[in-house]
Amino acid sequence: MVNFINIQAALDLQLPIIDVRSPSEHEKGHIPNSYNIPLFSNEERVHVGTVYKQQSKEAAIELGYTYVNPKLQTYIQEAKKVASKGSVIIHCWRGGMRSQSFAEHLMANGFDEVKVIEGGYKAFRNFVLDYFKTSFPLKIIGGYTGSGKTEILHELQKQGEQVIDLEGFANHKGSAFGGIGQGEQPSVEQFENNLQYQFSKLDLKRIIWLEDESQNIGKVILPASLFHQMHKAEVLFLEIPKEERAKHLVNGYADCGDEFLKDGILRIKKRLGGLRTQQALDFLACKDYYNVALMTLNYYDKYYLLGIQKKMTSRIRKLKLASTNHHQNALDILKHMKEMENIKLTAYSHGAGCGCKISPALLSEMLHTDQPQVLDKNIIVGNSTRDDAAVYDMGDGTGIITTTDFFMPIVDDPFTFGQIAATNAISDIFAMGGQPIMSIAIFGWPIDKLSAEVAREVLAGGRDVCSRVGSPLVGGHSIDSPEPIFGLAVTGKINLKHLKRNDSATQGCKLYLTKPLGVGILSTAGKQGKIDEKDIDIAAKSMTTLNSIGFELGKIEGVKAMTDVTGFGLLGHLVEMCEGSHLSAEVQFDKVPVFDEVHKYIEQGCIPGGTYRNWKSYGHHTSLKDERYKEILCDPQTSGGLLISVEEGEHLKVEQLLKENGLQAVSIGKMKAQKETLINVV
């Protein structure tokens, strides 16, 4: 009886695999390291197939036996060469008659362990295509043509790094000259098979280095899922002088034959232009390969720059290198990566994120003034209500919103810090129902402690967020400061009919909070070195999630008030809403969204200092059913969610919108008539 086995189990067993399909089928695509012992030759397979279609299945089977019977002994001899220990795996196209018949023949002739792949080669192909949907820890080596990226990959491999040489598997260097001196390219199908096999041997918890490539490498095509990941992955862009790169190209191509080089030049004639093409051909005729290389680099550098600008990632780190010494460049890359990994931005600041805010009580004391305030009548939201931003009425039904926010690092990764700071600052615009249109950076940097390269990463993170929301980073101001500081001054616009303030809630409104609380606790656990590895990214993911839903909420008339929850915690910002609206609020603590993981860190004492400052400022306005609630409700949030006050008749519309955007959509409480105690937590 034939024993079937699924494809994953078959690959895990690492037994010899025999492919009994015809030679042409095997050549088009096969399981790597499998052996082809064809049941039928190419011509025999075609003949059997024709009889099956034109006559009957029975006639085709009978014809098949006439071809197979004379070769039965040969099959056994060939199989013993492959599987001398008598254990083997068999497959055909779909695990049908060919593989089953072959397996039965081997079992009848002394083979102890014979298994047939269920679903055959077709199952393997589905397995391969699904495999590339796996999330890979990719790092991309980028750089202009002639940088020696492939050679650097090989040097990185010698240093113990995990590397996939895509061009090596494709037998093509990825340009008009890429096929020169290379062997025949595999089929797209076999390229995918070989690539999957190579990936399967790697540790997916460690970085995998790839060279930056187009989806097409010569005639082969990268799997769509893998290419999409490459398009989003961090790129290390090598900046090597053009003259050095030209020398590298001369060393690689000068001996390949002038006719091949001429053909390559003519392939890019349209991009080079007629004059440059002729100049390149003239240099070639004189065997001036260096100037041929310089001419072609003029085209390839522009082409590559356009490609890098279209990438879905903004994580493009640049590394200047002096030459194309591949060994030294690989060492410099590893040194650069180690330096970046060892950066702990939070070690350079005494506070973190919005937890750096001055306490509300002290801030009120600082802002108090007896000086007369002369305000422009067009300033319709100013400092009097402690709102998220100021608003200027343009007189045509639109308003200009302006705000600023900045703080010290709350995470160690520079790029992520930049993203968080920008997300937090821009949130003030969304919290008022507006649309950000322009941003200016506020930047302080300890230039004697942290490198310009790290600073550039912070700014890149901020620029990434600004670009995504259509609020380009158009300038800024920087100072040499003892601690890293980053944030934005953001300008937005709004239809004044959609303006949402924090002091306009009405009695009976339901309250919603769009993000879980606990960012301050998780960040403190990280700074104290107590956070579990699996919890490290929870806070960062929340803090880099934009509150862009505020723009849509602003269009809903039933949304009466809105603000974002940041350094003063949920309690502080709700007190401000209650005071401004002359109301009180009842909060159901068990409905308040909180990260599940924070409770264990509370037990370990990971409470931010800002929590106690917030309670000191707002605690007298609050009644708590359980004193322990304050550790959650006063937790200073950085880039927290939106606190929304919605009249009861419109709450279903708001809940639907929140759900559609993957946000918290459960009411946490209600606005009530004003009482002596502003907030009652039950």
Image: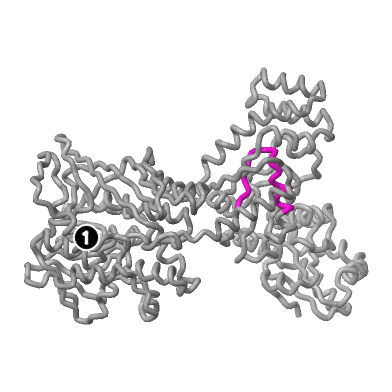
Q: How is colour applied across the structure in the image?
A: one colour
Measuring 16% from the left and 68% from the top, which residue is drawn there? 670
Measuring 39% from the left and 49% from the top, which residue is drawn there? 444
Q: Is residue 553 left or right of residue 487?
A: left
Q: Is residue 212 left or right of residue 530?
A: right
Q: At which x and y percent is residue 665? A: 28, 65
Residue 465 in the magenta stretch? The answer is no
Measuring 76% from the left and 64% from the top, which residue is drawn there? 58
* In this view, 215 is above or below 92: above
* In this view, 510 is above or below 269: below
Q: At which x and y percent is residue 211? A: 65, 48
Measuring 57% from the left and 54% from the top, which residue is drawn there? 225
Given residues 356 and 435, the one toward you in this image is: 356
Magenta region: 139-155
Say which quadrant the N terminus sits in.
bottom right
Q: Is residue 277 left or right of residue 451?
A: right
Q: Secondary structure at mark 1?
A: strand
What's the amino acid at mark 1? Ile
Residue 537 visible in image:
yes
Q: Residues within 10 Å of mark 1 (few under 14, many from 20)?
A: many
Q: At which x and y percent is residue 267? A: 70, 29
Residue at image mark 1: 644
